[in-house]
Image: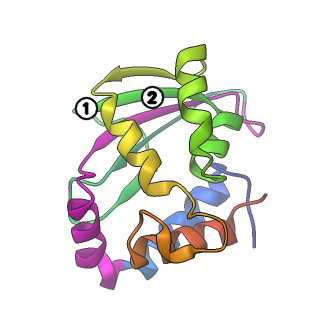
Amino acid sequence: MRYPFLSPEWIAAMRELRADYAEHEAEATQAATDAALQLAANVTVTDPPFSDEPILGHIDTTGPALLIEEGHLEDSDFGIEVPWMLAKQLFIDRDPTQVMPALFGGAIKLTGDSSKILALASILAPPPAGDPDKSGAPDIVRDLIQRVDEITEP
């Protein structure tokens, strides 16, 4: 089943997916450490098509498992505010070419250590056409990305 990105149903499916990967937590944590991607970020997504309210969430790779969860953290490395459509382009379509124009154009608002958003974009970037082994992501991350694609409406 596929759900709109960041909808309550999508978030519930992501929780199930995280539970499926519980046995791989150590491997995923090591992958994040190896990629120097230890971050805690508050994310505010504006203008979701299924709600009149912005979505408040966070991404946290500093603990024993990658967390993408609802609500803001009290202590985060940085904050990002982004319109829903652009968030989908960045995190689901994984189009890293959208990052710099969106930053310079003011579509993305950052607070804190914004250098970490570029590291996140490089890990999520798709591999060169026809060569999935050239992705910047370790195997476990590529597998997880594929599973996320399977639950997300195009």
Foreground pick, 14 / 146: 146
Please give the residue where the numbered disc 1 appears in the rendered image: 74
Can you give x and y, in whole percent of width and height, for residue 94 in the image?
60, 51
So how many labels did they put on this image? 2
Residue that appears at 20% across and 61% down: 33
Task: Name the kind of residue labelled 1 in the image.
Answer: Glu
Task: Name the kind of residue labelled 2 in the image.
Answer: Ile
Residue that appears at 25% across and 33% down: 77
The span picked out in magenta is 22-51
Can you give x and y, in whole percent of width and height, for residue 140 in the image?
40, 77
Residue that appears at 45% across and 28% down: 80
Q: Quadrant of residue 85?
A: top right
Quadrant assignment for the N terminus: bottom right
Q: Secondary structure at mark 1?
A: loop
Foreground pick, 141 / 58: 141
Q: Is residue 136 left or right of residue 52?
A: left
Q: Is residue 49 in the magenta section? A: yes
Between marks 2 and 1, how big is the CA–CA gap? 14 Å
Please give the residue where the numbered disc 2 appears in the rendered image: 80
Residue 70 versus residue 101 in the image, above or below: below
